[in-house]
Amino acid sequence: MDKHDQEPTSIEEDMNKVGPVFYWTLGILSILILTGIIRPDFLESVTSTAQGFISDTFGWYYLIVVTIFLIVCIMFVVTPYGKIRLGKDEDRPEYSFPVWIAFLFSAGLGVGLLFFGAAEPIAHFAVSAPNAPEGSEQAAMDALLYTFFHWGLHGWAIYAIIAICLAYFNFRKDKSGLISATLSPLWNMDGKLGKTIDVVAIVATLSGIATTLGFGALQMNGGISLLTGLPNSFALQLAIIVIVTVIFIISSMTGIDKGIKILSTVNMSLVGVVFLFFMIFGATMFSFNMLTNTIGSYIQNLPQLSFNIAPMSDDKRDWINAWTIFYWAWWMAWSPFVGTFIARVSRGRTLREFVVAVLLVPSIMGFVWFSFIGGTAISVESAGNIVSNLPDEEVLFGVLATMPFGTIMSYLTIFVIAVFFITSADSATFVLASQSTAGSLNPGKRIKLVWGILMSATAAVLLYSGGLQGIQNTMILVAFPFSIIMVLMVIALFKSLAQERLREEAAERKELREWKKWRKDHDKKDKLRKKLEKKEKRNKKWKSHDKVADEKWSEIVEPQPDPSEESSYQQQKLPEDILKDQEKNQEKDK
């Protein structure tokens, strides 16, 4: 049995017990779903009014706060904070880099790449150009520039902030995997405040997921309608949602290391096939040129794009509300899901490694994707094959219809959308189940089943009540309060990082003091040792001198004879000495 699919421990079982957060969220979603079924016009009217108020009144706030998130991410790359691991210091990455990138790509981009791959550049080029007349060369340049802006660094910075906060507090500080746990440095999150924040996060997550699933159902419906002649209707969309729901619920029962991992790898392969098809049979050189030129324009104009709110032009402001504000709200509504999932698979990576990979790799992959799919769509439109009059969900299939093997690739594209749909929903059930069971890393299967059904039901009701616009309105409405929570999460993260840094500095100072003390003792001992060695060396030198002196003295002065050698000594005496001795002895006898 895989380690991530083991039976929950007793602690895990406690975490899997649903609490007030689950029931509060269930109640809110039930009211939303019932209202959408009984009074769809009323729901669409309320969400539209609220969305307009938020976009007009707080559009500036969205632009500023998302740019701040990007600046914070860049700061993690260039400061010493980048060395901190999302986990304990001894933790290392669990997944290989290619598999990890596949997780990011499938969860963070998914259906949106296929839905907007051709639709957004065509909309900016031929339907509603931001700065130039529709169909002009400047409109074509701006089309990819704004598409890069909406799918580039800013959006991935939103995902990165959520993932960093969740992974840091969960894996490094041993907090629960809840959004509320990331605010623990600011307030006590064990009471009603923490539960309220978790409810807002779950509702925001569900609205973002429902938006994406709605896009997927609409685009699959559009492709099937163009290929088979079946009507583009809510009934067909509902049938698609039901079929896909059954499949992703079955997949969700197998866990991350089986269902989601396999689906993510399959996604990357299928997207690669679609991309190669456009590279070979699409407007290849035009796309390469557009990619090169737009990257330069993106780098050059990024600061101006980041803060452009068009205060002097109502038309341009309406365009920004419809596109840029919508995207920032969508990224933020989607971020609890993607952030939780990315945090789950990023344990052991450093902040610097994480931010560089999350910001650059998916952004560059997205730039290349939109350059070839969007560039081919612009080329097709410019050649007189009008696809701009099609609904957004059918634009990609309209472009494929003008290319060789277009029918085969259209069916393959529908299949790819379905796989993305299943992968996103599969990952979402894990995240929603985890957030509603105290941050469990292995939520129970019954909880996943409940969330899978609720998620699909919400997407179906929003499609029924207001179509695509109704989904967008609801998402922007829900994303606004969560954006405030994200700002608080950043503040809490910096507070915790500052406290950790203070503790590290205190430990470093203590270590330095201990080292200085050891060094002082060592120097003292070393000085004493050298003194003793010097003294010993001096004594040894004097002993050597004494020995030499004794040897020389022995050569000058005769040693005292030994009594045993008396006779030989006597023999050595001179005759007059012997006579003197004899006289002395005689006197002594007398």
Image: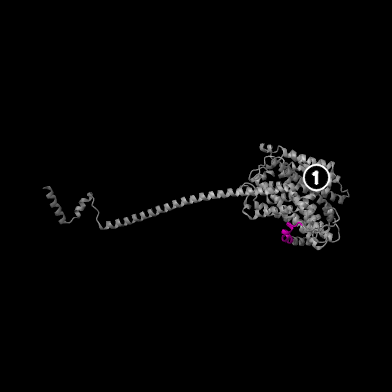
Q: Nearer the viewer, residue 108 or 403?
A: 108
Residue under the point 37% across and 55% down:
538
Label 1 sits on a secondary structure element that is helix
Q: Which of 542 and 175 is in front in this view?
A: 175
Residue 373 vertical position relative to residue 213 in the rendered view, above or below: below
To which residue does mark 1 refer? 459
Q: Which of 226 and 358 is in front in this view?
A: 358
Q: Is residue 464 left or right of residue 165?
A: right
Q: Is residue 445 left or right of residue 467?
A: left
| Image coloring type | one colour
Q: Report whether residue 523 is seen.
A: yes
Could you tell me what secondary structure mostly forms the magenta stretch? helix
Instruction: Say which quarter of the image contains residue 315.
Output: bottom right
Residue 534, horizontal then vertical, whole percent: 39, 55
Magenta-drawn segment = 296-309
Residue 512, horizontal then vertical, whole percent: 52, 51
> In the rendered view of the protein, which quadrant contains the N terminus?
top right
Q: How crowded is mark 1: few (under 14 residues within 10 Å), some or many (20 or more)?
A: many
Q: Nearer the viewer, residue 222 or 278?
A: 222
Residue 301 falls within the magenta-colored stretch = yes
What is the tally of numbered marks visible in this picture? 1
Q: Which amino acid does label 1 sit on?
A: Ala
Residue 502 falls within the magenta-colored stretch = no
Residue 110, horizontal then vertical, whole percent: 76, 50
Residue under the point 29% across and 58% down:
552
